[in-house]
Image (cartoon, helix red, strand yellow):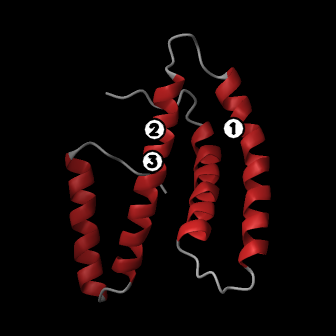
Amino acid sequence: MKNNLVHKDSHTLVKYYALCNLMVDIIDEKWTRSSLNIHKVKLLTNQLKSELEKSINRIFNGSYDDKTDIGQVLDQFVNASTIMDTLFELGLIMDEMEDDKKDEFNQELNDLLKKYGVEIKG
């Protein structure tokens, strides 16, 4: 089983940082270039990312023992960010489903997660 980030409390901070990285990727790769506010949104997102990066650096620099593979932690971070983008797209698709189909699909997803021992707390 892969190592998780050493301190569970750091997950929230890392999640926000990953969201900012994802936003920058969306701006760079998917945002319509004719949008007038693209530069301002990117600037503000990068400012937020910079502030979060300071805290992330403290976590990465001071929270790991000699046995922790930082490369593996960073790979976990990148992989989780990619999965987060995919799951967000899934959420958008589910939101457009009829309520009964959405509920049925959601139940099947929860059952699948439970089968693999995955418990997500909101």
Q: Where residue 99 sits in the image (x, y, percent)?
A: 31, 86
For marks 2 and 1, the one nearer the N-term is 1
Identify the residue under disc 1.
56
Looking at the picture, tell me which residue is in the foreground, 71 or 101: 71
State the CA–CA distance, disc 2 to disc 3.
6 Å
Q: Is residue 78 above or below residue 49?
A: above
Q: Where residue 42 sits in the image (x, y, percent)?
A: 72, 67
Q: Where residue 117 sits in the image (x, y, percent)?
A: 27, 42
Which circle marks residue 75 in the picture? Answer: none
State the CA–CA distance, disc 2 to disc 1.
14 Å
Identity of the residue furthest to the top in this view = 66
Identity of the residue furthest to the bottom in this view = 98
Marks 2,3: beta carbons within 8 A: yes
Q: Could you tell me the amino acid type at mark 2? A: Gln
For marks 3 and 1, the one nearer the N-term is 1
Q: Residue at x 43, y 45 (%)?
A: 79
Q: Residue at x 55, y 35 (%)?
A: 8
Q: Is residue 7 above or below residue 68?
A: below
Identify the residue under disc 2.
76
Q: Could you tell me the amino acid type at mark 1? A: Ile
* Direction from residue 70 to residue 49 in the image, left or right: right
Identify the residue under disc 3.
80
Marks 3,1: beta carbons within 8 A: no
Q: Could you tell me the amino acid type at mark 3? A: Ala
State the CA–CA distance, disc 3 to disc 1.
16 Å
